[in-house]
Image (spheres, grey):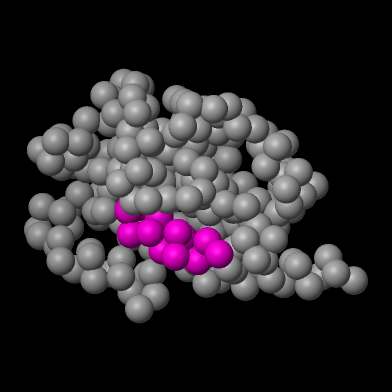
Amino acid sequence: MSLNGVLQALRRSRDTAEVRAAYDEFLKRLDAGQVAAQACKEGDPMPGFLLPSADGRLVGSDELLAEGPLVVTFFRGGWCPYCAATLDALEAVLPELSRAGGTLVALTPETGGRALATKRDQALHYEVLVDVDLAVAMAFGIVFRTPPLYTELLRRRGVDLAERSGNPAWLLPVPATFLVGRDGVVLRAWVNRDFTQRAEPSDIVVALRSLQILNAF
C-alpha cells in the first residue's frame, strides 16, 4: 500500500465528530492564511541552516549539500501518528534514495531529547534535526498557529506543543518535503496543508533518479 493509502486508513480509524470539527477548522485556518501558497517553491533558494541533530551534533545545510542533492522533510513530532507513518515509509526507501544520490534529513520542532527518542524508537538511519523555535520552517514559509478546536483536541490528548517545542506560541510546520540541488536551489516542493496527505516516497525516489540521469550528461 502507498504511504497515502496508509495515512487515509489511519485517518478513517481516528474519525469522530470531534476530530472532524477540529480538522475542518484546521484546514480553514491554513486556507485563510495561504500557508501552502507562501512556502518555498521550485526555483527558490533553500534557506540555509545549522541545527543540532538528535545525536547532539551541529549539522549544516552546506555540509549536507556537499554530498549531493538533499531531501528536506518537516514533521510535527513523535506524537503525530501520520508523521510516524511517514518517517517509517521514508526509512523503507532510504537505500533507494541513497542509490539515486540523495541525502535525507528530517526536521522537527520538538526539543528535550524527543528527536532522539523518535529516531531510536523508529530505528531511523537518516539525520533528524531539531528546528529550534521553528526558525528554519519559518524561513521555508510553512509555519502556522494551531486554531482553537485543534489546540483543545491536542491538549485533551496530552499533547502540549508549548512544552514539547519550548515555544509558547503553539506553532506547527506544515509537513512539507523539498528536493534541493547541490547548488541550493529547490527543484521539487511537496507542500500540502492537509497533514493526512504527504509526499509519496516513491515519487521522491523517481525525482532523484531523474536528476541523476540529467546530471550524467
Q: Is residue 7 left or right of residue 213?
A: left
Pick the residue in front: 23 or 206: 206
**Would you say residue 88 sits in the magenta stretch?**
yes
Query: Which span of residues is magenta-colored?
Result: 83-95
Q: Is residue 81 left or right of residue 75?
A: left
The percent coordinates of residue 10 (x first, y second) are 23, 65
What secondary structure do most residues of the magenta stretch adopt?
A: helix
The percent coordinates of residue 196 (x first, y second) are 33, 60
- Image quadrant occupied by the N terminus: bottom left
Q: Is residue 34 above or below residue 206?
A: above
**Would you say residue 158 sits in the magenta stretch?**
no
The percent coordinates of residue 137 (x first, y second) are 51, 37
Q: Residue at x 69, y 61 (%)?
A: 101
The percent coordinates of residue 150 (x first, y second) are 22, 43
Say whether residue 194 is visible: no
Say whether residue 182 is visible: yes
Question: Where on the picture, by quarter, is residue 95?
Answer: bottom right
Q: Residue at x 67, y 42 (%)?
A: 64
Q: Is residue 28 above or below residue 168?
A: below
Q: Residue at x 45, y 25 (%)?
A: 133
Q: Is residue 196 left or right of residue 159?
A: right
- Image quadrant occupied by the C terminus: bottom right
Pick the residue in front: 69 or 56: 56
Q: Residue at x 85, y 69 (%)?
A: 216
Q: Is residue 191 above or below residue 151?
A: below
